[in-house]
Image (cartoon, rainbow, N blue to C red):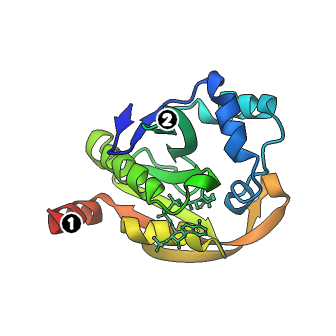
């Protein structure tokens, strides 16, 4: 479990299905990140079981209510296949956008990644047009690496242009000393 000023980051549990569905059903959340809106509480429960109840994926829980409002995690994939790398991914329920909550959660997840897990590199990507996510990554100190055309987005049955950013442990440490 991780903690910030306004948030608890803790593993997803099946009983979060209703809260998850409440936000993940909104078409403004999943599709821009590459997954379809959730269609029912049962569907959300299945996604929690299959995709969210995995190591280093956390429900973003608002301390004020004790309920999950989004998700954040570190994943291994094509972009981050080495043991000392991960890709950061996140989403948040629309009613909570614009309060700096994902940057707040991500700063703690990045601290955890570099200090506790001793990762060397954290990647983060977004699809063309996702200005909100681009901005989050900029605020976190990620730097632009490359753009790929025609990235397959299997869950949406289409291809998109993808932009890839990186934060290395060295750059993260430099940011910490600069802000100390
Ligand atoms: C991207 C996302 C996680 C940002 O979370 P957040 O906690 O709202 O982040 P911030 O509060 O820092 O806002 C980021 C930017 O979004 C924009 N924004 C904020 N509130 C907004 C709102 N209500 N409507 C539209 N845009 C908004 C602003 O440009 C803001 O940048 P700023 O700090 O320069 O003003 C959230 O918008 C989201 O879940 N989007 C859908 C899923 C997604 O894109 N996931 C990432 C895939 S790569």
Residue 85 visible in the picture: yes
Dividing the picture into quadrants, the one containing residue 152 is bottom right
Q: In which quarter of the image is the N terminus?
A: top left
Real-space CA distance between mark 2 and mark 1, rounded to the nearest whole angstrom: 35 Å
Residue drawn at point x = 49 percent, y = 31 percent: 66
Q: Residue 39 carries which label?
A: none
Percent position (x, y) of residue 74?
48, 46
Residue drawn at point x = 66 percent, y = 76 percent: 129
On screen, residue 7 versus residue 115, left or right, reads right
The residue at label 2 has a CB less than 8 Å from ligand 1 = no
Q: Quadrant of the C terminus?
A: bottom left
Q: Which of 76 and 158 is in front in this view?
A: 158
| Vertical order, 110 against 168 (above or below) | above
First reached walking from the N terminus: tag 2 or tag 1: 2
Residue drawn at point x = 75 percent, y = 52 percent: 26
Q: Which of 53 and 179 is in front in this view?
A: 179
| Vertical order, 31 against 47 (above or below) | below
Q: Which of 15 and 90 is in front in this view?
A: 15
Crowding near the residue tagged with mark 2, few <14, some 14–19, many ≥20 C-alpha atoms within 10 Å: few
Element under label 2? Answer: loop
Residue 142 visible in the picture: no
Residue drawn at point x = 57 percent, y = 45 percent: 70
Q: Which mark is residue 65?
A: 2
Percent position (x, y) of residue 10?
46, 32
Percent position (x, y) of residue 64?
44, 38
Look at discs 2 and 1 and give the one toward the viewer: 2
Ligand 1 is in which quadrant of the figure?
bottom right
Instruction: Give the residue at mark 1.
Output: 174
Dividing the picture into quadrants, the one containing residue 174 is bottom left
On screen, residue 111 versus residue 27, left or right, reads left
Element under label 1? Answer: helix
């Amino acid at each position: 479990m991780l903690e910030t000023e306004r948030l608890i980051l803790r593993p997803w549990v099946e009983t979060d299905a209703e809260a998850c569905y409440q936000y993940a059903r909104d078409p403004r959340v999943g599709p821009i990140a590459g997954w379809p809106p959730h269609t029912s509480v049962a569907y959300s429960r299945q996604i929690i079981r299959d995709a969210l109840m995995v190591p280093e994926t956390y429900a973003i829980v608002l301390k004020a209510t004790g309920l999950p409002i989004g998700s954040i995690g570190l994943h291994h994939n094509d972009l981050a296949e080495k043991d000392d790398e991960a890709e950061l991914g996140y989403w948040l329920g629309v009613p909570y956008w614009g309060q700096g909550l994902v940057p707040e959660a991500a700063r703690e997840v990045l601290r955890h990644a570099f200090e506790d897990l001793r990762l060397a590199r954290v990647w983060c990507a977004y699809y063309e047009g996702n200005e909100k996510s681009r901005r989050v990554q900029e605020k976190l100190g990620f730097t632009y690496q490359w753009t790929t055309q025609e990235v397959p987005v299997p869950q949406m049955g289409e291809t998109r242009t993808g932009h890839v950013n990186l934060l290395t442990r060295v750059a993260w440490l430099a940011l910490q000393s600069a802000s100390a």
